[in-house]
Image (cartoon, rainbow, N blue to C red):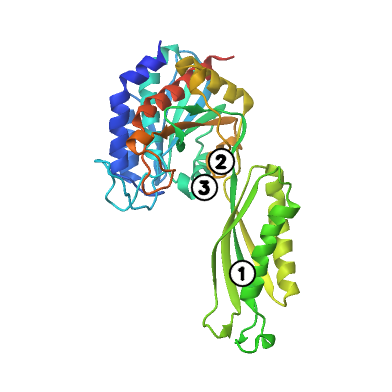
Amino acid sequence: MDIKQLAEKYDDYIIKMRRYFHKNPELSWEEENTTDIIEKELNNMGLKTTRFRGKTGVMAVLNGRKPGKTVVLRADIDALPIEELTDEPFKSTNGKMHACGHDCHMSMLLGAVKILCEIKNELEGNVKFLFQAAEETAQGSEYYIKEGALDGADAIFGMHIWGTLNAPKINIEPGGRMAACDNFKITVKGIASHGSAPHLGVDAIVAAASIIINIQTYVSRRNNPLNPLVITVGTINGGNRFNIIANEVVMEGSIRNFSPELRKEMEGNMKEIIKNTAKALGAEAELEYSYLAGPVINDEYLTKIAKEAAIKLYGEDELVPMEKVTGSEDFAYYMEEIPGTFVFLGCRNESIGAIYSNHSEKFKVDESSLQRGSALYAQFAYDYLKDK
């Protein structure tokens, strides 16, 4: 059994599927054709599939020769509302784009399914293949958990193609790897008056500006600088006319951090800053706080298995360090239920113009990395099930 050779055998298939998905992207919860194609491929491999009550996404299970543990291999399938500006012959032309690499994730996992089906008599347990919709909403995985996708599972493994990591290098590290993402909305209420007489009103714009400054001061002065925290106010809307003191401002933003403990404190601390800042200026302010994906924190035991699997396949020199990422992943929801690990696969190659980061309208990948993704999915599953 040589998983590396099997991945090489299916290289053309993996690339073909990736190009099809790339050319035909679909947005979150709209991945009807994508799901149908994946299901067809899984059925052609002899697997029974499970669909999800009127939602997109599909799952299949491969039972090994002997009973044992169950591991979930997950890939996300949705695209982004981005107009593609690459020169690829298979570029999208429908105003949507797989600018985050989910086309790669789907094709890599399909390649892994083919590999594992070939060696199913050597598997000592079961493998669930989960093709998940709506990762870009930061909440898609919650639905699959409620639908029982993790029932009976002991561990989960995920992977992300990464535009700033050189191809075909692999990054596998324990601990915090991606940040939590929580969103907020702040509504500041003042009193309108003529712009020439600000003392007769309460300026919601000035109060909003003070709130923004005090939030950033919290980041730099109250938060431990060794504990990363990013607060972004992404939108601010208020005012009706150049000579009227604004009576309302609405701001929206996000909060990123890697600490479950800090995350629990943030809503209360934000509320205190916002209300007191507004009050000091005679205004009122309300905070609406939404909890989305938590931090991606890799399990040490599973990360060790993943690292050893990668070394077995490609040697220790192909593993490289990479800083943790302040972007977020709804894979974190799975990790709150069962142990998991999440790895990064490089796709940057300057010689072919693959130099742009994920979510860029010019995002390209070095497709030579994809067979490695398939091999690593399969090798991790095989080794995890074998390890007692």
In primary-sequence order, the first of circles 3 and 1 is 3
Q: Position of residue 39 (x, y in %)?
A: 33, 34
Is residue 89 among what the camera can see? yes
**Percent x, y for residue 152?**
54, 28
Q: Residues within 10 Å of mark 1 (few under 14, many from 20)?
A: many
Mark 2 surroundings within 10 Å by alpha-carbon count, few (fewer than 14), some (14 through 19), many (20 or more): some
Residue at image coords 53%, 30%: 156
* Quarter residue 41 falls in: top left
315 displayed left or right of 82: right
Q: Which sits in the foreground, 343 or 288?
A: 343
Q: Secondary structure at mark 3?
A: loop
Task: Please tell me which of labels 1 and 2 falls first in the chain.
Answer: 1
The answer to which of 294 and 8 lies nearer the viewer is 8
Q: Residues within 10 Å of mark 3 (few under 14, many from 20)?
A: some
**Mark 2 sits on what residue?**
325
Q: Indicate whether 48 appears above or below 269.
A: above
Q: Which tag is nearer the camera, tag 1 or tag 2?
A: 2
Q: Secondary structure at mark 1?
A: strand
The amino acid type, in three-letter code, at marker 1 is Thr
Is 367 left, or right, of 346 in this rendering? left
Give the quarter of the image for residue 377: top left
In the rendered structure, which amino acid carries the disc numbered 2?
Val
Percent position of residue 260, x then y:
68, 43
For the residues labelled 3 and 2, the Cα–Cα distance comes to: 18 Å
Q: Which residue is mark 1?
A: 187
Res. 45 visible in picture: no
Residue assigned mark 3: 139
What whole-number distance in Å separates the C-alpha atoms at marks 3 and 1? Answer: 24 Å
Q: CA distance from mark 1 to mark 2?
A: 30 Å
Q: Is residue 155 above or below residue 284?
A: above
